Image: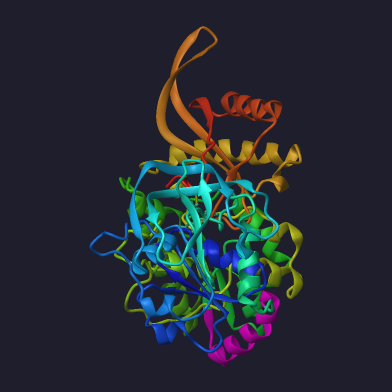
Amino acid sequence: MIKIIDCGSQLTQNIARRIRELGVFTEIVPFHTKPNKVLTKDLEGIIISGGQFSVYDENSPLYSKDILNSDMPILGICYGQQSIAHILGGKVRQAVNREYGETKVSIIKTSPLFKGIPKNFKVWMSHGDVVEEVPKDFKIIAESQNKEIAAMQKANIYSVQFHPEVDHTEYGRKILDNFLTICNAARTWDPTREYNKIIKETKEKIKGKTGVGGISGGVDSTTLSVLLNKIADKNYHPIFIDNGLLRLNELAEVKSILNELNLNVIYVDARKKFLKELKGITNPDEKRKIIGNEFIKIFEEEAKKLDAEYLAQGTLYPDVIESVPVYGSSSKIKRHHNVGGLPEKMNLKIIEPFKNLFKDEVRKIAKQKLGLPKKLIYRHPFPGPGLGVRIIGEITKEKLMTLKKADSIFIEELKKRNIYNNISQAFAILTSTQSVGVMGDEHTYKNIIALRAVTTKDFMTADWYDFDKKDLTAIVNRIINEVDGINRVVYDITQKPPGTIEWE
Ligand code: XMP
């Protein structure tokens, strides 16, 4: 296995995702993990992540020098490169030109890390500091267009200033693949092989017990429900909560999908309760917290009625990592409602069978092991807090109706035009901002709707979908003509990072 030393980067999970995709098992450990816990027998290599710190910051995440002296193959990324230089006696300084976004690098010395890669290629950078002087015996193997050190190497220790783990870096995968070859890492990781282990462990935990859990009609919670239904022998009760923040006709659509799967679904209408609690709330984190708390209250109520002893959650590996920041809340991007939002005292035991898997690993299990229908597996994901995080500011019934209509036109057109399956996630956002327009002879002052459509493999980096002009024009015209209160539509062309997929 490969261990990734997390120095607080929001991209650490991407590294893990890529390494697993390349067939090698990997785990993320915090930078302060003791060297003997990092340097275990099964270890084949170490990756040191990026992070938002400078090596000169007072609380900079500096790991033990023993790790660098361990003879293990090592790859440092961004802050990983700077910290290797710093710990081994090189020099780090502020970059003269802060490199952010797409940059070009040139390979200046052959290295096994760059095997099969052309001399010049595009990379994605995000850093304020650079290595000015490499440590003793290191050689510079690549430089950036600004002539900064883009990569260095000494024997088995490699580092790069750019991010090979994001899709925007050309040959990023190839660089990580080369590193795994350097490590001679066993390419044996396959999530479907985890399936039997998951079944066995979960069976032991829930034997003879009754349980509840959420179901949204999305791939994670539905796969979880199908799996638990299989092993809990009708003692597992998935709960679908209508929180009033669902899309137009969502309840009916979800019902039709779930009916085919023969699950014990309990439907709860909690629309009034959620909207009451959300009244007047504008802060996104607070909205998420309230929604999360309401979900839990309902699960507890339903669990009580059934004498249930456990609550199953579709928690994924990224949720677990995002909820355990290296320092305070600096590296936490968002509060995902299914982790972190649980009350400290809860009478239900938590069961999280997928907590070591990424989303597409769950999809693989859903498809190959549980035979779930394609239309479910490839349904665009919909966040737990629903439209609550797609209305900027306060949520009201009127705003919800406006957004539902606009969103439904958008999705309907994508399906009609056969574009839906080319896009990983698409939705509308009500910006709660008005702008001036002219309709007929009249001036208008109405709301702006934003459209977001992204393509992504893992939802951790994403690109905006490049529409044909005729498709986008038709969608925009329909929204303005058919949805009251809208006179302008904008299309979001922000990549992730730096943007997130959702707006709140
Ligand atoms: P972001 O906005 O973080 O979204 O780029 C990445 C993916 O996660 C979904 N998402 C959520 N899902 N609860 C969820 O269940 C949440 O609070 C939440 N926030 C974002 C988002 O829709 C996208 O697919």
Q: Which residue is pictured at 69% across the width and 79% down the height?
A: 188
> Can you say whether 318 is above or below 466 in the image?
below
The total number of labels drawn is: 0
Residue 183 screen position, x and y as percent: 61, 75
* Quadrant of the rendering where the N terminus is positioned: bottom right
Whether residue 345 appears in this view of the structure is: yes
Q: Which residue is pictured at 62% across the width and 51% down the height?
A: 456
Q: Which residue is pictured at 34% across the width and 66% down the height?
A: 89
Residue 212 screen position, x and y as percent: 52, 76
Q: Which residue is pictured at 33% across the width and 69% down the height?
A: 62
> Can you say whether 192 is above or below 162 in the image?
below
Whether residue 336 appears in this view of the structure is: no
Q: What stretch is highlighted in magenta?
A: 189-211
Residue located farthest toward the left when viewing the structure as drawn: 58
Quarter of the image for residue 325 reads bottom left
Quarter of the image for residue 404 reads top right
Q: Which of 468 and 205 is in front in this view?
A: 468
- Residue 362 within the magenta-colored segment of the rendering: no
- Please indicate whether residue 441 sits to the left or right of residue 134 in the image: right
Magenta stretch: dominant SS? helix
Residue 460 screen position, x and y as percent: 53, 56
- Please indicate whether residue 263 sits to the left or right of residue 324 in the image: right
- Please indicate whether residue 347 sits to the left or right of residue 377 in the image: left
- Please indicate whether residue 155 sits to the left or right of residue 170 in the image: left
- Residue 196 within the magenta-colored segment of the rendering: yes
Residue located farthest toward the top when viewing the structure as drawn: 441
Q: Nearer the viewer, residue 252 or 154?
A: 154
> Can you say whether 214 is above or below 417 in the image?
below
Query: Which colour scheme appears in the figure?
Result: rainbow
Q: Nearer the viewer, residue 134 or 284?
A: 134
Residue 447 screen position, x and y as percent: 45, 28
